[in-house]
Amino acid sequence: MSPLLRDILFSRLHARFFIILSSLVATILGLFGPYFQKLFVDQLTGTSTPYLFSLNLTPLTLIFLAFACVLSAQGFSQLTGYLGIRESVFMQSVLSQRLYKQTLNLRVDTMSHRPVGEIIQIYAADIPGSTTFLEQTLPAGASTLFPLIFAPFAISMIYDIPLAPTLIAMGVITSLNTAMAFRQSKFFYSFKRLAGERIALVNEWIQNIRTIRILGWISHFEKGIFEKRKAETTNRISMVTNGQTMNAVASSVTFVLNIVALVSLIHYSNHRITGGDLLALLWIVGVFLTRPFRQMPWFFTFGFDAWTSVRRLEAFLNIRNENQNLTDQGSANERPSRKAPSDVALEVQNLNLKVGKKEILKNINLCVKEGEFVALVGEVGCGKTMLLLSLLNETGATMGHYFLNNKNAASMTLNEVRKHFAYVPQEGFIMSASLRENVAFIYDMRPDGDDQIEESLRLAQFEISNERVENGLATEIGERGVNLSGGQKQRVSLARVHYHQAPILLLDDCLSAIDVDTEERLVTQLLDGAWQDRTRILATHRLTILNRVDRILFMQEGRIIDQGSLLELMTRSQAFRDYTASVEKKLEDEYVSANA
Ligand SMILES: Nc1ncnc2c1ncn2[C@@H]1O[C@H](COP(=O)(O)OP(=O)(O)OP(=O)(O)O)[C@@H](O)[C@H]1O
Ligand SMILES: [Mg+2]
């Protein structure tokens, strides 16, 4: 059995046991209802019938007992449903937490083929789907199974007739139901898959709707979405048709059961059949066998469906990062092989990164001194971002050794590693919150520390009075507030880095959307001003900044192929000259097309 299914079914066993117990009590009490009613009718009509127990009760007591049994059976049946839902909600919270932890744990390179939409679908559809076992299968299963087991025995005991004909009829009906349910579960599976594909497409469409409109791609997307819808509708029609047939067959097939039970009674009964006999028989067959048989195909269908969800969820939870070199606990028994010089902020040797079969970073050796300002340059796709992410331990890169501030990173936890850094991602990052909260990176931040926040924004060249943020630091920005431009996002991200006093700054192309004048002030006041003593690694395509840095690392196809000052590289490296020429050419082309 799959470990996840085992957890879903068998954790909190006592609670699960109560579901079964409550369902069992509901069934037994329920079956006593028709029995007492039969005795009541027989007493009223003056017919003597054999008693199961030697009771001598008045008709009033008998009808009261029948009523009490039916009522409490109903109560226990409701209780079974309630307990099932409670267990299901509990398990959903457990599974959601596992999904959350797993998502947090997976690195960028491991996640590269998993769209966010897929994870959302697992969260929204498969987690509730998996717990259908608790909400549906267990209570419905118990309330299907127990009547099916007890009702034939009740018939046979009350009427003293053989079991075989009823059991054979039940066997045939069960097989028919199972076959139809299996067919239905296939439709359910396609339904989920198709809905998932459509949602992924709609998600992409909505997220990029403005760009798609500008590019004139709306009709392509709409066509794609409509086609998916069509496939879904066709599948849905088959599913509903099969479901209706299943219902019709399941309901009408119990008619056969009625006949079989009635014929058995007439044929085998050794006493005259009374009105009470017939009433109780129709009740037992009509309620205790018909209802479970009607439920049965759905019980199987939901079971198959839940199993699909468990498999999808389990597949995601089982994804492992390759080459996990740091864990949440750190590997404390690894000793530093040697000490790095004391003024070294970061030293990494023989860093390699492979994603699938593709080598992304190859034998990277990097040593950055405390307070040094290093630029990482190279063609688009040469591995700058992946190198920065590897230093943050966000990829599966392997390293010969890795020292941070003279300490071996292998003996640090992930959080300890990340505490050494502040990071600006290439696309910037803004959350839907106030400007104040975006800089401090804390929700519900009080205005006490505004001086520091304002100073950080000022150094990042984000002048509140010029930036159309009318409510100052309290202005809501991000998706639910003012949408910032690319350059504004980058400057807010830089202010955030300044506000948080981390020793090593990893800045991924954080000047790409900033104009030349602002860049000049930003470099003078912040990057090479207030941050003078901080260690800085800046990935960039801006040539203007290259004469301001201490050292340039020049990357090509995943390797650092040269390093030195701008003058040194321009003098000795043809590859570097080609690279700068191509960047200049690109800028020129952009200028020409913008002014055409
Ligand atoms: N999440 C990922 N999973 C797998 N491969 C990736 C991932 N991100 C990037 N890559 C690959 O790694 C290589 C390096 O990409 P990277 O983003 O580091 O380039 P870059 O130098 O930062 O480029 P740019 O100048 O455009 O920012 C590319 O070949 C890219 O296809
Ligand atoms: Mg990049």
Image (cartoon, rainbow, N blue to C red):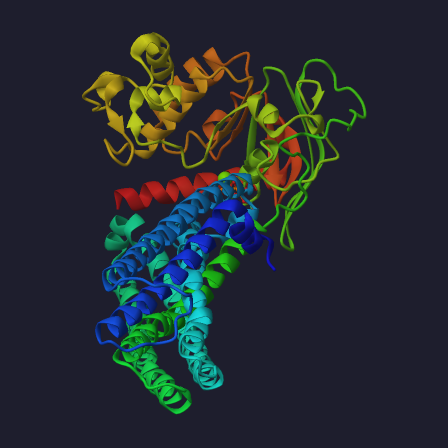
Where residue 139 appears, as percent x and y from the top left, is 41, 58
Q: In which quarter of the image is residue 504?
A: top right
Residue at image coords 62%, 54%: 356
Nearer-the-camera pick, 171 or 4: 171
Quadrant placement of the N terminus:
bottom right
Residue 355 vs 51, above or below: the answer is above
Residue 306 vs 260, above or below: the answer is above
Q: Residue placed farthest to the left in the image? A: 470
Residue at image coords 46%, 67%: 304
Nearer-the-camera pick, 501 or 388: 501
Residue 332 vs 527, above or below: the answer is below
Q: Residue placed farthest to the right in the image? A: 337
Tally of marks: 0
Where residue 285 appears, as percent x and y from the top left, is 34, 76
Where residue 189 appears, as percent x and y from the top left, is 42, 68
Say left or right for 550 vs 54: right
Residue 123 vs 140, above or below: the answer is above
Where residue 520 appears, as percent x and y from the top left, is 40, 20
Let me know if residue 441 appears in the view. Answer: yes
